[in-house]
Image: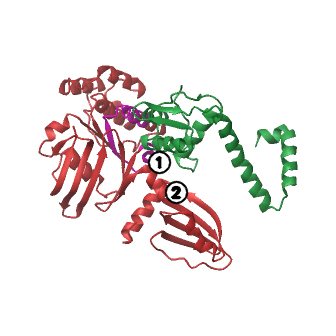
Chain colours: A red, B green
């Protein structure tokens, strides 16, 4: 067994109006990776390549030790996938779906776990899908996936459209999966707060390329917002560390990458007073990283 | 030992600092005893709904500060040091007092004046309770 849930090397996929390129990405077993990117960044294309649903033009993709898409049948037994637009049969009950999945995965299906999820997710197995709310349908899809205990769980926007209570139920259950060190999760989300709380690794993707991929603590540690106050205007220009300068009269705000305290001296020597050195939220970091990449300044 | 910590996303500080602070206060208050085994990184992460790497970072920093000891393959323990709770408490208090002293200086207050303020607060229950 490989040490990685998945590994992608130099993966590329060309479409008429979009290309995914230079994708190098790996997730160690037992890890959870959050994938963040604007709409159309290539998150779904990347996920589909991982699932073996589409073949890349270039590069290699290995999932749970199996080459994709050539050996996808072997890998898929242990991959679980849930997306927002997952289709369930409207006229069938959740119980019918549970029986159906159990017949496909008789070895993997855990009936006891499935029943416990029914109550955790506040679902009624005898209810037909067409009578369910959006949140109940999403939770039903997640139940059907979790109960067959895949090794790699892929969630495409798992919390989109869920109310706060349902969102918490889903996020909690995702963490419970990680109790088992051999199971890994990849999830894409617009909600950077979810990603920030749960992820070990975070990957930012924009315009078909990976902007950056690192462990979460490094991301948070690398960026700071500096607030300076000076009576005479400061001359600060964008460089390797200063990624953005916002001047508002006597106040200057800087967005800084790989900050350390000694960098403040250059401005205090110009007569500036440091009003604050603040951590940034993952959302702010994401925007800063994307802007730095788009403007061609290596972050 | 209940491995459950309560973390806030609105706190503004990195999550690992919140974890460190809560563990330190558990030790200082004697909830986690010297030499006692603490939850594994993964257990604590799952119970507190934060990522494994965040808890790992907190444990590493706590090891550096001498609060926890990790034996590879065995687990992590509260350091065997009976003074530990006391030390943490003093550190915490000092942190707040240094801040108060810095603030007092910036307002031009002398040390005696600050002490006098503290005395007034301490004798006035309401002021202390509300911090």
For the N terminus of chain B, give its image quadrant. Answer: top right
Q: Is residue B36 above or below residue A194?
A: above
Choose top left, top right, bottom left or bottom right for residue A12: bottom left
Q: Chain of mark 2?
A: A
Q: Name the residue located 53 percent from the left edge and 63 percent from the top edge.
A: A260
Label 1 to label 2: alpha-carbon separation:
12 Å
The nearer-to-camera label among 1 and 2 is 2
Q: Which residue is mark 1?
A: A193
Q: Chain of mark 1?
A: A
Which SS class for mark 2? loop
Residue B66, disc = none
Residue bearing mark 2: A280
Q: Residue at x 79, y 57 (%)?
A: B104
Crowding at label 1, few (<14), some or many (≥20) Cα neighbours within 10 Å? Answer: few
Q: Residue at the far left: name it.
A: A70
- Give, as a single range, the part of the protein colored magenta: A170-198
The location of residue B17, given as percent across then percent down, is 55, 46
Q: Is residue A185 magenta?
A: yes
Q: Does residue A165 show up?
A: no
A117 horizontally vs B119: left or right: left
Q: Considering depth in this image, is A57 or A84 the residue closer to the camera?
A: A57
- Same chain for labels 1 and 2? Say yes or no: yes
The residue shown at (58%, 68%) is: A264
């Amino acid at each position: 067994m490989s040490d990685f849930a998945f590994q992608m090397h130099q993966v590329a996929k060309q479409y008429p109006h979009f290309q995914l390129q230079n994708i190098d990405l790996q997730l160690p077993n037992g890890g959870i990776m959050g994938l963040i990117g604007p709409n159309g960044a290539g998150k779904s294309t990347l996920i589909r390549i991982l699932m073996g649903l589409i073949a890349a033009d270039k590069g290699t993709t290995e999932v749970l030790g199996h080459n994709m898409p050539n050996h996808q049948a072997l890998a898929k037994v242990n991959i679980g996938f849930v997306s927002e637009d997952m289709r369930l049969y409207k006229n069938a009950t959740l119980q019918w779906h549970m029986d159906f999945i159990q017949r496909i995965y008789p070895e993997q299906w855990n009936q006891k776990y499935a029943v416990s999820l029914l109550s955790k997710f506040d679902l009624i197995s005898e209810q037909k899908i067409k009578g369910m709310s959006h949140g109940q349908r999403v939770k039903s899809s997640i139940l059907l996936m979790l109960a067959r205990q895949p090794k790699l769980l892929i969630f495409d926007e798992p919390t989109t459209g869920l109310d706060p209570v349902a969102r918490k139920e889903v996020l909690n259950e995702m963490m419970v999966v990680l109790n088992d060190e051999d199971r890994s999760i990849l999830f894409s989300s617009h909600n950077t707060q979810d990603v920030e709380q749960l992820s070990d690794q975070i990957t930012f993707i924009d315009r078909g390329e990976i902007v950056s991929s690192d462990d979460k603590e490094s991301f948070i540690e690398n960026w700071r917002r500096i607030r300076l106050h000076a009576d005479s205007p400061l001359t600060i220009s964008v460089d390797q560390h200063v990624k953005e300068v916002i001047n508002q009269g006597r106040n200057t705000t800087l967005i800084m990458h790989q900050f350390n305290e000694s960098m403040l001296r250059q401005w205090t020597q110009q007569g500036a007073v440091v009003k604050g050195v603040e951590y940034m939220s993952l959302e702010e970091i994401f925007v800063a990283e994307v802007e730095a990449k788009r403007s061609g300044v290596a972050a | 030992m209940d491995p459950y910590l309560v973390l806030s996303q609105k706190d503004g500080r990195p999550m690992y600092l919140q974890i460190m602070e809560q563990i330190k206060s558990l030790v200082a208050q004697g909830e986690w005893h010297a030499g006692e085994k603490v939850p594994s990184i993964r257990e604590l992460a799952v119970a507190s709904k934060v990522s494994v790497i965040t808890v790992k970072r907190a444990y590493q920093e706590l090891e550096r500060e001498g609060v926890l000891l990790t034996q590879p393959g065995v687990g992590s323990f509260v350091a065997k040091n009976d003074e530990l709770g006391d030390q943490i408490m003093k550190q915490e208090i000092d942190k707040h007092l240094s801040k108060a002293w810095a603030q007092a200086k910036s307002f031009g207050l002398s040390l005696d004046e600050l002490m006098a303020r503290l005395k007034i607060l301490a004798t006035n229950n309401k002021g202390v309770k509300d911090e």
